[in-house]
Amino acid sequence: MKSNAAILLLSCCFLSRCAFGQDRVAISASEAACGPRAIRFEVTADKSRHPTPRPEDGKALIYVVQKDDASTRFAAGGKWLGALRRRTYLVASIDPGEHHLCAIGRIGIWSHVSLYALNAKAGETYYFVTEYGELVADQFALHQVDPDQGKYLVAWAHLSAFHPK
């Protein structure tokens, strides 16, 4: 019995050491798609306008919808493109090519990062949703949705009005 307890204790120590030994350099490189962490936004829902532009010539368009209660910052290539709160959307024009997208969702004191690689094509429109998982509250995700679902969610949401704090 004592040997089982000792093995359990050693296993816990080993596993906790593995968790603390995470590769901070790799994490930082992955999060390069995000904007500066210190920048925060004030976000409101603009219920007076509901723009749904089409892509400009030679550009692609990204719509991002926030479904739940989190506040979210959204970036591409290390630059913040905007912020969201419950039931809001933002729209951003981007150049064609490879883009590394970042969403940082925050509920209370907890924040979570979700990353996505997009190869944008000129003239195309891409729809994304940020949301927390229903079963596990800390499963935050930025994911691409079908254009029909995306159009529906944009119609359902209000335009996000944001500015740095």
Image (cartoon, rainbow, N blue to C red):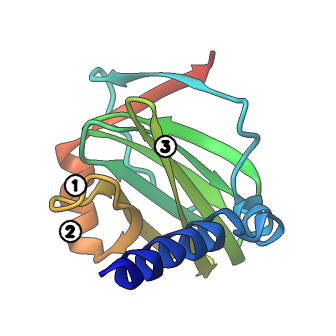
| Rendered location of residue 97, percent (x, y) | 72, 80
The location of residue 61, given as percent across then percent down, is 53, 62
Q: Relative to 66, is 21 above or below?
A: below
Instruction: Identify the residue position indicated by label 3 in the image.
Output: 111
Mark 3 → mark 1, Cα distance in angstroms: 24 Å
Circle 3 Cα neighbour tier, 10 Å, few/some/many (<14 / 14–19 / ≥20)? some
Q: Secondary structure at mark 3?
A: strand
Residue at far front of view? 2
Packing grade of label 1 (10 A; few <14, some 14-19, many >=20) is: many
- Residue that numbered label 2 is attached to: 149
Q: Amino acid at mark 2?
A: Gln
> Against 79, is 71 above or below?
above
Quarter containing the N terminus: bottom left
State the residue at coordinates (57%, 69%): 13
Query: Which of 33 and 161 lies nearest the eye of the viewer?
Result: 33
Residue 81, visible in the rendered structure: yes
Which image quadrant is residue 48 in?
top left
Visible in this render: residue 57?
no
In the image, 54: left or right of 119?
left
| Residues at discs 3 and 1 in contact (Cβ within 8 Å) | no
- Residue that badge 1 annotates: 153
Vertical placement of 4 versus 160: above or below?
Answer: below
The reply to whether the C-beta atoms of the residues labelled 2 and 1 are less than 8 Å apart is yes
Residue at 63% over, 44% down: 81
Distance from Cα at disc 3 to Cα at disc 2: 26 Å
